[in-house]
Amino acid sequence: MQDNERQVEVVENLLRSAREEGSYFYIPLTVILELVFVLHRTYGMEREKVASIIRSLKTMPAQIENESIVFGALELFIKGMKFSDAVIYMQAIEERTTPVYTFDKEDFKGKPNVMLLG
């Protein structure tokens, strides 16, 4: 959010060092989940803006855990699905562990490879 100048400076130095050394950061899926939640719920950012910020991580010297799942989930998130549910759905699709069994009729209604319960 760049609301703390000292923290911005520290992060910029870390990124610069990683680029110079040819190294990268590993961003776990749990960090992406938390980041989306904080940006959308805490800061009230629109879904498209949140997705843009997450996509911009690809410009950093970083490896995103389950990147294809994250970016697939972002597309569903933009369309209104909760990001955490979108990750569950995309992970099941990618790992071929469908159908997804769920009671969540709101987020999963009409999705292929889903069994709505109850």
Image (cartoon, rainbow, N blue to C red):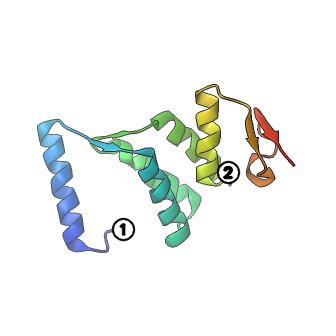
Residue that protrudes farthest toward the front in the picture: 118
**Helix, strand or loop at disc 1?**
loop
Relative depth, front residue between 38 and 57: 38
Q: Amino acid at mark 1?
A: Met
Left or right of 101: which side holds 9?
left
Tell me, yes or no, if residue 44 can be seen here. Answer: no
At a point 52% along the width and 61% down the height, the residue shown is 37
Instruction: Tell me where residue 77 appears, x and y as whole percent.
Output: 62, 51
**Residue shown at 20%/57% (left/top)?**
12
Report the front residue among 118 and 58.
118
Within 10 angstroms of label 1, few (less than 14), some, or many (20 or more) residues? few
Image coords of residue 19 (percent x, y): 18, 42
Amino acid type shown at disc 2: Lys
Q: CA distance from mark 1 to mark 2?
A: 24 Å
Q: Which residue is mark 2?
A: 79
Q: Is 67 situated above or below 106?
A: above
Residue 7, by quadrant, is: bottom left
| SS category of the residue bearing label 2 | loop
Residue 72 at what x, y percent from top left? 57, 39
If you read the primary sequence from the N terminus, does the residue marked by circle 1 or circle 2 appear first? Answer: 1
Percent coordinates x, y for residue 9 in the rendering: 18, 64
Task: State whether residue 71 appears in this view.
Answer: yes
Residue that lies at the very extreme toward the right in this rendered image: 118
Nearer to the camera, 62 or 100: 100
In this rendering, is residue 15 above or below 2?
A: above
Dot 2 crowding, Cα within 10 Å, few <14, some 14–19, many 20+ = few
Q: Which residue is mark 1?
A: 1
Q: Nearer the viewer, residue 62 or 31?
A: 31
